[in-house]
Amino acid sequence: MDNWKKLEDLNLFEVQKRTQIEIACLELIIKKDFKSLSRFNINGFIKILQREYELDFTSFLEEYDAYLAENGVEKKNSAHVCPRMSSYTKEKSYFWFFIAIIVVALIILSALAISKLLQDVADENTTNVLNQEQIIIEGNDTNATILFNEKGFIEENSTDDNESIKEILDVNVSVQDENASVNENLIIEENVPKKAKMVVNESTIKPNAELWLGMVDLKTFQKSSKTIKNEYVISLEKDMLITTGHAAFSLNDEYNNILEFKSGVSKFLMIKDGKIKQINKTEFIKENRGKLW
């Protein structure tokens, strides 16, 4: 019957915020200052408190009505403007709903940013690896050029020596023998049939291990890539650029000759006019409009 007295234990500031009943009025109710309360619509305040805090004001109202009867005070139902009932309704807050939307949006944006960053790092690492490997290839090309020049020098000296010997021998050879040899050579060359080389229109790549292939169409410059473990056939009728991963592999050229490529560095190939050949990094970039990949 008297649980309305629990109002004393509540934080009046919170009660005022929740019910819109001024703290002064709440204090009058707690003190049972019926004289001052008679100027207000006390029944309206009591209904709000009963609804919001489930308090029982039965005994309080009985005492209040008794006070009014004893003192001949008329019950005031409209002496004080009562706040609108909608003001006491619990406000529906969408705060957490908006927080959830913002958190989800931030998670999605973060995921997209991280994905883009990882892709950029992967592309940069691939470019760095190709650059480092091409330095090795160009170094090998330089050494091969030096060896070729040295070989050419030896062959040139050998040719000069042979010509000197031939001149000496020619002095001792009669004109008739020379003419006979020439005629004999002509007859032999005419009788020996020339072997025609068979041209194929596709090449089969045979990897020794898992091999990455990057391909660029030389007409559209559209890029594609794939990783192969088994034999892979490419057409020699479509002009394209090819760069590979580190694994060793072999392939046939347009004359079905087998070309072997060792592991360790990336390779650069070009298919053009039905022919396939190995090229260096500089040629690859030039044919690819200034791009390494």
Image (cartoon, rainbow, N blue to C red):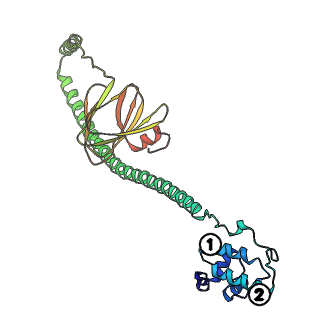
Under tag 2, what secondary structure? helix
Marks 2 and 1: which is nearer the front? 2
Image coordinates of residue 106 in percent, x first then y, are: 53, 59
Q: Which residue in the protein does label 2 denote?
A: 70
Q: Which residue in the protein does label 1 denote?
A: 52
Q: Is residue 170 above or below residue 41?
A: above
Indicate the quadrant where residue 158 lies. top left
Looking at the rendered image, the quarter that the N terminus falls into is bottom right
Q: Nearer the viewer, residue 235 or 118?
A: 118
Image coordinates of residue 275 in percent, x first then y, are: 36, 28
Indicate the quadrant where residue 101 lies. bottom right
What residue lies at 61% left-to-right and 81% top-to-bottom?
4
Under tag 1, what secondary structure? helix
Q: Nearer the viewer, residue 147 or 47?
A: 47
Name the residue type under label 2: Glu
Q: Is residue 50 above or below residue 269?
A: below
Name the residue type under label 1: Glu
Image coordinates of residue 67 in percent, x first then y, are: 74, 86
Tell whether 214 sits left or right of 47. Answer: left
> Which mark is first along the chain, 1 or 2?
1
Indicate the quadrant where residue 234 lies. top left
Image coordinates of residue 53 in percent, x first then y, are: 60, 75
What residue lies at 81% left-to-right and 80% top-to-bottom?
74
Q: Nearer the viewer, residue 139 or 261?
A: 261
**Does residue 18 appear in this view?**
no
Count residues near mark 2 (Cα–Cα under 10 Å), then give few for <14, some for 14-19, many for 20+: few
What residue lies at 23% left-to-right and 40% top-to-bottom?
208
Please say if the residues under marks 2 and 1 sit with CB atoms less than 8 Å apart.
no
